[in-house]
């Protein structure tokens, strides 16, 4: 049976010289929707080299490693190349270790973020790997491919790490592409995947910041593509029917003037494409604020780098930027109705306690971020955080296990809060009510998380309806004043009108007759009343709300909402 997500080409005889090598790229991703840009980024630089035959085997971390290894072996490659990052590391090893057993004299070259630290231990533990590249591979890998037969030249290849036949470890530092703008675009490679729900666009490389937890924390200087280059790439991307673009620039607004020009480019594609950006909220110039406010709705999804709302934590973690200006910037972004703003917090940062994390969660929810993500710290190879003396897993994804400020059990609680946040705050149906609860009682976050843990629902899928029932029952016992708002949220989510959270709801036969006979005035909240709608009145609450449903489409959620007085 052929492997899903696995691409294959016809194999060829092995009796070829290294001057006409067959290079196989093992492309393992965390899910089918994700697609690494490493292969097309590197292949684009050598496109046209007739002596090198390239092919690829694609898979995900959920595939069978033995089947993937067999698919690799069918090609009988001379070289296997693979890029590692924390969530694919184990699977890459599983596949590569099997594949080399099926092939003779194959060489394995690896790269990616996993090799930004000391690579000696990895190479000695995985002797089937010929060499690894630390840093940027667009020039380093082609240089190594040119030098494969002559190991005496490997010392000249920037970023290459390997163990020679005499057992000595060789380390050539880190590879950097000085002229980033001179690179050929990944989209020029035949291996660029246009079939995914989104594409990744890297217009700058490097980061001005010095975050000790980030692999780009020491990546200086920031290098740019010109606006003309970005415009050319966007036109190509749009021509392929792509709807979502994830801009990989570490801090999109580091250069405010350039960011404004980029936004002007993006605005040309309003209604055709949506852009995901990472923005630093403390670096919002007045010009950039005005430009953001003028953009069409739905064009941007922003990730505002927050990590912590404690200045000492940020300073110890090496993150630049004023906390005061970051909060002011975040509040401004959240006030804009034409865009969505995502914020994140990192549990396990130095000096960051569970109590501080909970306080920050409450504060961000009150601010009104569109989405809030709470992650545990990953102590990544090559980051300064590895020198902080923290206890973390020695295996990928290198999650934090304990710090002087947070215990293992508290980290577990933090991840349970993260799950609660995903289920309720990050759910369109329940975000409004969750924010109301947090504003009413800052202890809700931790108390409700403990309640969900007791129900044993945090480690399994939970439907939107089930979440609503759980929250309704919890509020009935602890926050009865919010039951009206919960009933309204339940109905707006298109859930069953026959279940308890819908409250006392009555069907109205004719809206106009009902209003006139009862001497009522209708104030429209959302939508437009139509005679063809089916109407229901929510009673038994402090407000009387009318909901209208489209009788023709039978869409489960109401398309009209109004209040009668």
Image (tube, rainbow, N blue to C red):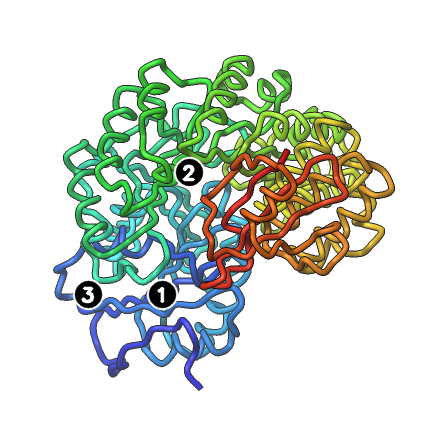
For marks 2 and 1, give the one nearer the viewer. 2
* Image quarter in which the N terminus is found: bottom left
Residue 225 is left or right of residue 123, and the answer is left
Q: Quadrant of residue 307?
A: top right
For the residue pair 298 and 512, the one nearer the viewer reads as 512
Give me the disc on residue 400. Answer: none
Give me the disc on residue 301. Answer: 2
Q: Where is residue 40 in the image (x, y as percent from the top left)?
A: 27, 55
For marks 2 and 3, give the one nearer the viewer. 2
Q: Position of residue 102 (x, y in %)?
A: 43, 79
Residue 466 is left or right of residue 533, and the answer is right
Q: Is residue 441 above or below residue 25?
A: above
For the residue pair 378 and 461, the one nearer the viewer reads as 461
Q: Quadrant of residue 232?
A: top left
* Element assignment for label 2: strand
Residue 426 is left or right of residue 336, and the answer is right
* Element assignment for label 3: loop
Residue for point 50% across, 23% down? 330
Q: Distance between the residues labelled 2 and 3?
A: 40 Å
Residue for point 68% across, 57% down? 497
For the residue pair 157 and 256, the one nearer the viewer reads as 256
Q: Name the residue under label 1.
A: 80
Q: Distance between the residues labelled 1 and 3?
A: 13 Å
Q: Mark 3 points at which residue?
A: 52
Q: Is residue 225 above or below residue 474?
A: above
Q: Which class describes the residues within 10 Å of circle 2: few (<14), some (14-19), or many (20+)? A: some
Q: Where is residue 540 in the image (x, y as percent from the top left)?
A: 77, 43
Q: Can residue 393 be seen in this view?
A: no
Q: Can residue 240 be seen in this view?
A: yes
Residue for point 31% across, 56% down? 39
């Amino acid at each position: 049976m052929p492997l899903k997500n696995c691409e294959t080409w016809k194999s060829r005889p092995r009796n070829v010289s290294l001057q006409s090598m067959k290079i196989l790229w093992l492309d393992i991703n965390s899910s089918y929707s994700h697609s690494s840009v490493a292969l097309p980024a590197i292949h684009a630089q050598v496109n046209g080299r007739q002596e090198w035959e390239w092919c690829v085997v694609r898979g995900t971390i959920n595939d069978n490693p033995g089947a993937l290894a067999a698919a690799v072996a069918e090609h009988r490659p001379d070289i296997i190349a693979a890029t590692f990052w924390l969530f694919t590391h184990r699977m890459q090893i599983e596949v590569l270790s099997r594949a080399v057993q099926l092939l003779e004299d194959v060489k394995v070259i690896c790269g990616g973020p996993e090799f930004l630290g000391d690579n000696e231990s990895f190479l000695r533990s995985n002797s089937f790997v010929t060499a690894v590249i630390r840093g940027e591979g667009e020039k380093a890998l082609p240089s190594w491919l040119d030098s494969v037969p002559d190991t005496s030249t490997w010392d000249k290849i920037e970023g290459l790490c390997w163990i020679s036949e005499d057992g000595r470890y060789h380390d050539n530092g880190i590879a950097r592409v000085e002229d980033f703008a001179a690179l050929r675009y990944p989209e020029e490679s035949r291996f660029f995947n246009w079939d995914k729900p989104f594409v990744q666009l890297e217009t700058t490389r490097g980061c001005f910041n010095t975050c000790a937890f980030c692999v780009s924390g020491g990546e200086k200087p920031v290098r740019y593509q010109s606006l003309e280059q970005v415009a050319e790439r966007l036109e190509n991307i749009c021509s392929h029917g792509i709807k979502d673009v994830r801009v990989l620039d570490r801090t999109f607004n580091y250069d405010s003037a350039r960011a404004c020009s980029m936004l002007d480019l993006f605005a040309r594609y309003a209604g055709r494409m949506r852009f995901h950006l990472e923005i630093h909220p403390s670096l919002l110039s007045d010009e950039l604020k005005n430009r953001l406010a003028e953009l069409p709705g739905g064009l941007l999804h922003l990730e505002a780098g927050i990590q912590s709302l404690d200045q000492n934590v940020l300073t110890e973690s090496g993150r630049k930027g004023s906390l005061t200006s970051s909060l002011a910037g975040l509040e401004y972004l959240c006030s804009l109705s034409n865009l969505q703003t995502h914020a994140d917090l990192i549990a396990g940062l130095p000096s960051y306690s569970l109590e501080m994390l909970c306080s920050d969660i409450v504060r961000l929810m009150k601010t009104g971020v569109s989405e809030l993500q709470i992650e545990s710290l990953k102590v990544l190879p090559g980051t300064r955080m590895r020198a902080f003396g923290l206890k973390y897993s020695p295996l990928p994804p290198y999650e934090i296990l304990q710090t002087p400020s947070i215990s293992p059990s508290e980290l577990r609680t933090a991840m349970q809060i993260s799950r609660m946040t995903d289920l309720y705050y990050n759910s369109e149906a329940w975000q409004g009510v969750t924010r109301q609860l947090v504003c009413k009682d800052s202890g809700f976050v931790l108390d409700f998380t403990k309640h969900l843990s007791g129900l044993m629902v945090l480690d399994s899928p939970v439907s939107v309806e089930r979440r609503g029932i759980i929250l309704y029952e919890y509020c009935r016992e602890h926050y009865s004043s919010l039951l009206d708002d919960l009933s309204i949220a339940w109905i707006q989510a298109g859930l069953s009108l026959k279940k308890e959270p819908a409250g006392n709801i009555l069907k109205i036969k004719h809206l106009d007759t009902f209003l006139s006979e009862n001497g009522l005035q209708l104030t429209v909240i959302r939508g437009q009343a139509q005679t063809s709608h089916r109407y229901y009145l929510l009673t038994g609450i402090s407000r009387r709300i009318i909901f209208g449903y489209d009788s023709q489409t039978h869409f489960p959620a109401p398309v009209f909402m109004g209040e009668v007085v």
